[in-house]
Image: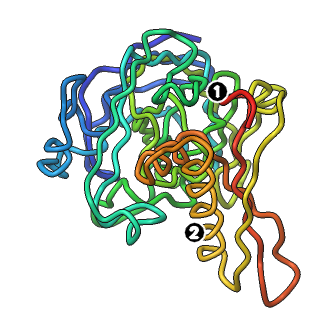
Amino acid sequence: MGHHPVPKRVHRLWSTEHEPVLEVEDGDTVSFGLAEATDGQFDPASTVDAVAGLDWDRVYPLAGPIVVRDAEPGDVLEVEFLELRSVDWGWTAVLPGLGLLGEDFPDAHLRLWDLSGGDRANFLDVADIPIRPFCGVVGVCPDVTEPQSVLPPGHFGGNVDCKDLVVGTKLYLPVQVPGARLGLGDPHAAQGDGELCVSAIEASLSGAARIRLHKGRRIAASRFETAGPLRTDADRAGHYATMGVAADLMSAARDATRAMIDHLGSRYGLAPIDAYVLCSVAVDLRITEVVDTPNWVVSAYLPKAYFGSL
């Protein structure tokens, strides 16, 4: 079993036509450095003008493809995260037309974060957000005839934005094409479940992972296995939660988020746009009920440990 640094060449579309940067075997480990999602278009001195000038052709640079020897469709690729370290700054943006509440917040907005403290990031002296680095995009290449955008996830993994893909988690991906062609990118320093405003604390990172190949183990879509209790810091002081009730889960999610924005504004005096950004990196959306037709319930959970007494 060997260890291999992943070359820094990147690609930005899922495609079988990209030249692999590395070939590994079952049991090998890889180390990598991942650029934040804009590939250097933002920096610690950026203003909101950088959002308006975003070059979308440079967005979502992926490390890879990493080819796994003997991987074939019908196999499963396991990616175990061994190390993930964010750099000392990050950003969260509201991008016009995107996000859960795109109609409520139509204007561009940019929030820069100081991550130099190592374990927490302060937000306007209101909240301290624990830093939990993970890769927003981890996937094998889908079986496509034309190059495919990285933005939508799929059963092959990809842009799943799962905040629990932290160190110790094992991600299982159904191999779609020979060699699997693993890609990684979109690193985050912290995020709430839902990534509500369409960005987390976006921050470049370095890390390492162990690759395993499970021959003949078929799964229909990606799965993951955590190493132990999750989010103990977030859970230790309880939560403040708002609820959305509607005949559509997306409507219920929006209503719960709007109620949380209202709470953060009335409790802390946050402007709605700042409360929205804070929700994207700190609030977890959870499906509370999907059986009591015709209405479903989504709840937005705010960890009180980040804020002190609410």
Count the labels in the image: 2
Q: Secondary structure at mark 1?
A: strand
Q: Disc 1 designates what residue?
A: 80
Q: Quadrant of the C terminus?
A: top right
Residue at x 60%, y 77% (from the top left corner): 251
> What is the three-letter code of the residue carrying label 2?
Arg
Q: Earlier in the sequence, mark 1 or mark 2?
A: 1
Residue in the foreground of this view, choosing between 63 and 91: 91
Task: Give coordinates of residue 155: x percent, y percent.
Answer: 57, 60
Residue at x 70%, y 70% (from the top left corner): 244
Residue at x 54%, y 24% (from the top left corner): 25
Quadrant assignment, res 294: bottom right
Q: Is residue 118 above or below residue 295?
A: above
Q: Secondary structure at mark 2?
A: helix
Task: Give coordinates of residue 144: x percent, y percent.
Answer: 38, 64
Give how far apart the Cα atoms at labels 1 and 2 are: 34 Å
Neighbourhood count class around disc 1 (C-alpha, 10 Å): few under 14, some 14–19, many 20 upward: many
Residue in the foreground of this view, choosing between 76 and 46: 46
> What is the three-letter code of the residue carrying label 1?
Glu
**Camera-side mark, 1 or 2:** 2
Q: Is residue 148 above or below residue 216?
A: below
Q: Disc 2 designates what residue?
A: 254
Q: Is residue 81 above or below residue 71?
A: above
Neighbourhood count class around disc 2 (C-alpha, 10 Å): few under 14, some 14–19, many 20 upward: many
Task: Give coordinates of residue 247: x percent, y percent.
Answer: 70, 86
Residue at x 57%, y 14% (from the top left corner): 119
Task: Give coordinates of residue 146: x percent, y percent.
Answer: 28, 65
Q: Is residue 199 above or below residue 169?
A: below
The residue at the far bottom in this view is 294
Q: Quadrant of the N terminus?
A: top right
